[in-house]
Amino acid sequence: MVNGYVPASLQEALEIRAGQDVIPYAGGTDLMVKRRPDAQYLFIGRLPELRQITEDENYIHIGAAVTFTEALADPRVPALMKAAVSRIGAPAIRNAGTFGGNVGNASAKADSVPVEVAADAKLRLISLRGERVVEIESFYHGHGTHDLGPDELIAEILLPRTGLDHWYYEKVGGRSALAISRISFASVFDMQEDRITKAAAAFGAVSDTVLRFRDLEAMLIGRSVAEAKDMKPAYLRAYDERLQLTEGRVSAQYRKRVCLNLLEDSLRTFGI
Amino acid sequence: MDTISQSVVRKDHGDKVSGRSLYTGDYAPEGMLFGKLLRAELARARVLRVHVPALPEGYYYVDAKDIPGDNNVNMVLDDSPVFCRETVEYIGEAIAMLCGPDEETVGRLLSACRVDYEKLEPVIRLDEAHESFFDYTYSQGDTEKAFAEADKIYDEQFETGYQEHAYLETQAMTAEPEADGRMFVHGSLQCVYYVRNALQRVLGCGPEGVHVMQDVTGGAFGGKEDYPSVLGCQVAVAALKCGKPVRCVFDRREDMACSPKRHPSRCRYRVSVKDGRVTAMDVDIRFNAGAYSTLSAVVLQRGMISAPGVYQIPNTRIRGRAMKTNTVPCGAFRGFGAPQTFFAVEMMMDHIARDLGVDALTFKQAHLSRQGDITSTGGRYHFPVPLPDMIRETEALCDYRRKKEEYQKPQTGRFRRGIGMSLQFHGGGFTGSGEQDIIKAVVRLRKERDGTVEILAASGEIGQGVRTTFSKIVAQELGLPLERIIFEYPDTALVPDSGPTVASRSIMVVGELLRRAAVKLRERWADGEVQEVEERYRAPDFMIPFTIDHFAGDAYATYSWAVMTAEVEVDTLTGMIRVLDACGSFDVGTPIDRNIVMGQMEGGFLQGIGYASCEKIASDGTGRIRGASFSDYLIPTAMDVPQLRCMLHVESYPDGPYGAKAAGELPLVGAPAAFLEAVEQALGGVSLSHVPFTAEDAFSVLMKGGEG
């Protein structure tokens, strides 16, 4: 038996969330596998309020219950996000799996999260108390834990509308489909007036949380391509020192060398 | 195409695709008790005491003391116990079974059981194993002399890992005491008579005391050859004690951790070469048998007989040992010992050719066996060996030589390619004189008054299509429509012992018996009468008698042949290996239903690629199987081999039905060598020696600058 609530509206969902110990459920591709007979679920996957993709001046808002398949079909969703999402599971899983679920599951292996981290995405969290918008990076505390209050729900993911045209994405799985990431890597690069304004690199599935090192990125910010080229060996060395990775289905050493290879290759594609 | 080869709708198709088929776990649970096994947590230990919680009414604890007969499951050496003896010999060995009407309660009681152990020193790794269950040696010619006269001697070691069957339906058996005192055991299995024979011994009864039926079975691949005898005895002993039906269905983790797997192997090949030809092979094969001997004797024999591959090697000395370790027992798996040695010999030939500076395929072709040549055991290849034609066909299909040359040039980009080809055979049926001396297959056909004909044979449908292909053979010979032929899931109370559903023997051996029986029935056909005919196995006259003591004579009546290629692309940034193309030419004689045979060829090929690449499972230092789940143990998906092209080359066999030979196992055997040869080329001509070969393995070769 599955015990749970099927709220008719977001308001009702928030009321249940505030009053009961429930696990938010949107898609359930992980929760089904980790089925807990003693748990109560809050089925929010069909709430219309959470299934929208909208835009404002600065952000694309992807509702927490938007599925990966829906996002892949939407012209507003950036190509970088599509590159990552298209490699998740297999069609049936992408039909069910949602953006909110991928974030809320708090796994460093979640394939949409490195993109969100590299893109400086934000999360809008809501509760009966109101709402707050947090940086995706600060949302995670460590393996399996995050900053979602017991009465809160993830409402939407906010992706910047601009600055995501130059991107790089790679996933290393044990096979070509239905594979949990062993390494994932997303990077975003931008320039204004011949100066590098963004060189974000996010490493997924290699540690307790998705990794990003803003202080190392700063080595390239404000520089010209030629200067960045000169800086490249020191930049790669710095990552080599900072990437302290965990062993999993593959060794920590393998993860590290592949991460550095991908980082270097991404610079190459950006002309550095 | 022969009429018999034209594809029909499978007999099991409708029920399976519509969900009407009842698998063991689908039968109504009313009145049934659920059994769960208490399993050892240490690889080797004396069991001092089991603390069982107070059991509610209707719940039972069953162990070795409840066995009325003897605590040995009938296989080869009969060393596998039903429930453990004084010691447990591997993690997961069954100590006892808890049974009761509510499955969750049984689970709770099971986790409340505590076992006191006296820990004993286990042997975990193959290279530290010192006790062998079996140790055979056979030889031909004068190996010492050949080595003494050699221009060069090569000495290499090859390793293969476990492989998990990954059938869709896990191990599942039910035992039901019947009103007349018989024990009825049914479940997911390949060999009804193996289970029946095991039950007789454990229950201490005659053949009249027990009968065994196959339920609809969701895949097997060899994994349900011996193990259902173990589980069948466990549920039967429990059902006898409880006086009620008892069912046990494994969950996936339990199945992967505790049921048999393919034997990991380590093969050392010493090979002498004189004037550019291989003159001798001295081969030392070690298989990791696990804690009990199960079927290791026969798995090892087939591996040893296949050790020189498809080649004519004048002098051979082959030693094979099945080593005992305190790990899960290994058993039968599609290919049955041959994939391990074929992998080794194909890689060895490849490495020697590279060292000699000659093309590997040309080198292999110069050593090919031909019709009339002697086999590794001094038998004869009595029938044509179509490998030269099959090589030509496969080369043409995948543009082999051009690609091999192109990929030989230095590659500098991110993605690097390679192509490999392997050659192999699979001997049809039981090894040696097994068919004649041990199995002695019997089949019957029973004609009803209305003219329908029922096949009475013990072969089980395990997805290979035998319900359909047997029916086609009988229908063809009697000139009847397929619907008039009935072939139900076998029950030992109703069908004679036509032998186990193993060794790619069903069509070639049992199918031919059915054809002959059908001829007999046709000749005696009388409308409106009930008629029954019987046919018994007899070895073909041409066979040279085989003695296992000396590994001498015809190990197999005939051989099926395969040529397989794989083309791969390695990503130098990540080590990931993508199979771009996989081609095969397979000679299984006349296909009895083309679709079914092609399904076997493609499925086996892909299963072999998985074995060579992503399918990795291991026991850790404590002897525990790691990665016993489908998120850790990755079998290839269709996305992993986008292009898989199989062809049939028909060299018909006069003693098989309409010319059919063995089919089921052949396509797996050569896949690992084809794959790894391709990877060797993509990595710049390194010498590799183990499977599974993963992205991380490829990456470490790249990091070392291309040294295997």
Image (cartoon, coloured by chain):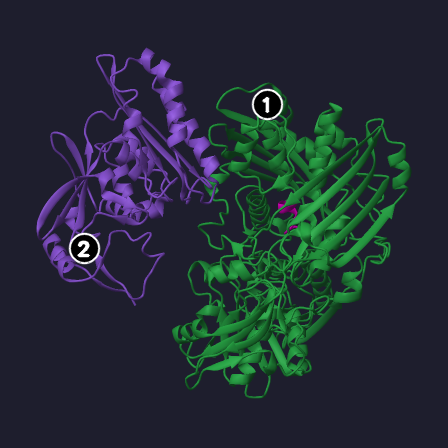
Chain colours: A purple, B green
Image location (x, y in percent) of residue A80: 29, 31
Image location (x, y in percent) of residue B59: 45, 82
Q: In the image shown, does B371 or B341 lie closer to the viewer?
A: B341
- Judged from the image, the secondary structure of the residue bearing numbered disc 1 is helix
Q: Which mark is residue B365?
A: none
As shown in the figure, which amino acid type bears the numbered disc 2? Answer: Pro
- For mark 2, name the chain: A
Image location (x, y in percent) of residue B245: 50, 80
Residue shown at the point (80%, 54%) measured from the top left: B136
Res B538 → quadrant: bottom right
Q: Which mark is residue A150?
A: 2
Compared to residue A25, the image places residue B188 above or below, namely below
Task: Please state the extent of the stretch shown in magenta in the rendering.
Answer: B661-669
- Judged from the image, the secondary structure of the residue bearing numbered disc 2 is loop
Q: In the image shown, does B544 or A48 lie closer to the viewer?
A: A48
The answer to whether residue B133 is visible is yes
Q: In the image shown, does B444 or B604 lie closer to the viewer?
A: B604
Mark 1 touching mark 2, by CB under 8 A? no
Residue shown at the point (63%, 36%) measured from the top left: B674
**What is the residue that sits farthest to the bottom in this orientation?**
B180
Q: Nearer the viewer, mark 1 or mark 2?
A: 2
Left or right, residue B553 beside residue B156: right
Compared to residue A268, the image places residue B383 above or below, namely below
As shown in the figure, which amino acid type bears the numbered disc 1? Answer: Tyr
**What is the residue that sits farthest to the left in this orientation?**
A129
Q: Which mark is residue B407?
A: 1
